[in-house]
Amino acid sequence: MLPPIEPYRAIAESAVDPIFVNDPSGCVRYANPAAVKIFGYSEEEFAGACLHDLIHHHRPDGTPYPREACPLYRAYTNGKSVHEIVETFVRKDGSFVTMAASVTPARVEGGQEATVFFMRDVTERIRAQQALAESEQRFRLITNSMPQLVWVMSPDGRINYVNDRFRQYVGPQLDLGENYASPVHPDDQEATHRAVEHALHTGNDFRIEHRGRAADGSYRWFLAHGVPLKDAEGNVLAWYGCSTDIDDIRHAGDALRRSQETVRLAAELTNLGLWEFYTETGELLWDETNRRTYGVPQDRPVNYDLFISCIHPDDRERVDRTARKFTVPGSTGRFFTEYRILRLSDGAERWLKVNGESLVDQDGHTRFVGTTLDITDIKLAEQRIRHASQRDPLTGLPNRALLFEYCEHLLAIAQRTRSSGALLFIDLDRFKPVNDTYGHGVGDQVLKQVAKRLSDCTRQEDIVGRLGGDEFVVALPHPDDVHGPATVARNIVEKLSEPYHIGDLQLHLSPSIGISLYPRHGGDLDALIKCADAAMYEAKKAGRKRYRFYNPAIDQGADQHLQLELRLRDAVERGEFLLLYQPVMDVGSASPSGAEALLRLPMPDGAMLAPAQFLHVAEAAGLINRIGEWVAQEACRQHQQWRQAGLPAINIAINVAPQQFRQRSFIRYLANSLQDSGMDPSCLQIELKESSVLEDVNDTITALEEIRAIGIRVALDDFGVGFSSVRLLSSLPIDALKIDQSFVSRIGHDAKSQVIADTVLALGRTLNLQVVGEGIESEDIFDYLRGHGCNQAQGYYFSGPLTADEFVHWFHAAQPERHAMH
Ligand code: C2E
Ligand code: MG
Ligand code: MG
């Protein structure tokens, strides 16, 4: 064996890597100890052997490795040098070892040509390289299977790796090593840059949404998520990242946002507040409009208690009750309600309409979602319409319907609070004649003034309404000592009796008031009105211009009243009245000068009612005019019948109710009756109560003048009780005064009455009026009156009222005797 030249031998002997020296034929001339150790052949086995045949004859997969195909073999047989060729060699024991081998031509001792063959064991290195390659391949495989764009980025922002999907998306213009920013949408670059810088600084993950450019130049939205790879000191070595395409989600989000925006705008335009209530947590959410509606500032937390506190006290309990049904966790349903609130910002009362419906989400949580609408304007309009339909158009007072509504409400409260109340039923005295005489225009004006005065006499909480015609009602919900029903009624009587000025007219009316008390007289409005109405009739009967409390005894009276009214109507229809005639004597000649017609109502049971028993009912029932017409007609007819029977043209007096004589229709009727019967108008006398001419003097004078123009005479009846002034009396176109019976009957007993009788007689003389003494029951009285200048006399002393036939007999009987007493 040829040893290498010293000192190379020593180096070769101590080297840890195999070294061979071969001759040009490829046979081993030297193998160092490392080669012996690694390959397992002894020096002797190596010596002279062909190196290729020994350690390189086949590959790890078992296929032969021919010498000609082996670059190493070619190198060391051709005297060429090669470097670091990695080959797999076979040890003596058949195992493989991977070596990096170099071949260098050399000369050995004696100048012979040789090749030096160095080897290094690279098995581990190669294995590591393979593992790395495999892992890289796995990484590629995985990332390429992902739908996301996967990338690796250096800390300075250069893209070092992208997966297929990335490459596909960005297209061929992508170059590795380029800055990540190039495919990012220009508008998103700044935000992206900031996020990446921040992440680099903190060493944390980063997430950013940005648009990325596609191969065709279009953009889509991505969510980029980068995770840092760090060294032992925590420095970022690379970013591993993944970008997810969120374009569809973003657009779905946009659509949702758009639809939310539409809802918000629609709600805002219609002023529709939106709210949500979570039944499990009790959480209440209001949108801006809802807050505005309730007047709750944006920064104030909203909860159920706040909501309830905004509700109007009158509605609060009801709303709370309803709402609590739905606030129970898990409750579902749909509701609709209306209520008032007192707006938190300014305390204004507003009407709200609220709708709500439950929604159950995917997790089974229930919430109510609803709207709030301020409907105050609608409510006000409704109220105005209701007002119009529930008010009496003339007076503006509540009409019957509204009155009932109000009163039912008051009664309900009174029932709850166990309080009392009073109802005043007001009827105007003598209103109908005003209407009939002056027309409805004047009547309406009176009613308006009455309404005004009633409202002035009452308090805010009292209710004044018009039932119709001249009937009014006042309800006093809280009568007390100062404002008791009697006080109010007195006040009303006084106020309504003051003169009414309408144009040039001055009218006098008065009210009659009936009062019923809650709960004493009834529990419902109908009963209370009925009682007050009955009491009102009592007030009328008692002489009007007064008030009466209801008294259960009235009921009986009311029943009689009704019966009488029915009888009167019948009598009017069928002309079933009767006139009696009371003789009137001429004092001077002591002979009959005429008769006063006195009305009677025959009753089915044979009774004969006197005027005092039925005239007030006739008046209240509006029958007085027709009765008066009948009386006038009948008296004229009777007068003519007597003439035909041979009686002289005596005077006949009829009594005329106060409201009658001022009516043109009545005056016309009188004239017609006279004409129809052919009676001499100067034989007819009308008697008016003194009290009835005191009102509306001007009208009275006009009417009297018209009556007298026909030729009819006029007497003032019951004179002396009415306080008419002498001046007034002197201006009245009248013919006679009838001294009131009350004075006449007391002549001789009562000095005052006697003085009055004297005065009337003197007045008659002065004013050139006939004076009639009526109610003469004794000779003394007759003598007294005759002695004091009385012109005519009437009374039981001569005769009571007689039927027409009786009168004829009496007349004939009285004639010859002259002073005959009956
Ligand atoms: P008057 O016009 O003052 O009539 C006289 C009344 O006195 C009559 O009562 C008569 O019966 C009564 N009388 C007559 N002589 C005497 C007497 O000596 N002593 C007493 N105590 N009384 C006597 P009568 O018929 O009940 O009528 C009452 C009133 O009814 C009348 O008072 C009159 O104001 C009214 N009246 C009568 N008839 C009619 C009528 O047809 N129409 C109207 N509107 N009123 C009438
Ligand atoms: Mg009379
Ligand atoms: Mg009289």
Image (cartoon, grey):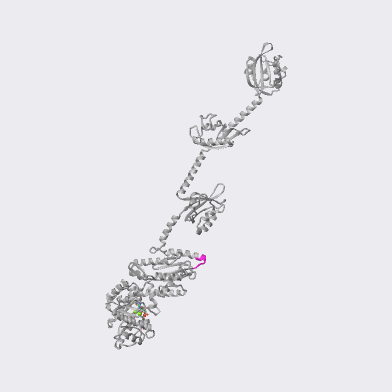
Quadrant holding the N terminus: top right
Q: Position of residue 72 (x, y in %)?
A: 64, 18
Give the camera-side residue of 123 and 13: 13
Give the camera-side residue of 559 and 185: 185
Q: Could you tell me if residue 70 is visible in this image?
A: no
Q: Position of residue 683 (x, y in %)?
A: 28, 79
Horizontal side of 284 relative to 666 (left or right) equals: right
Quadrant holding the C terminus: bottom left
Q: Position of residue 350 (x, y in %)?
A: 47, 55
Residue found at the far top of this picture: 110
Number of residue marks: 0
Residue 785 against residue 543 in the figure, above or below: below
Give the camera-side residue of 126 and 690: 690
Q: Which residues are magenta?
A: 414-420
Horizontal side of 112 relative to 821 (left or right) equals: right
Residue 253 against residue 120 in the figure, above or below: below
Residue 735 painted magenta: no
Q: Position of residue 618 (x, y in %)?
A: 38, 74
Regarding ligand 2, which quadrant of the image does it lie in? bottom left
Residue 418 painted magenta: yes
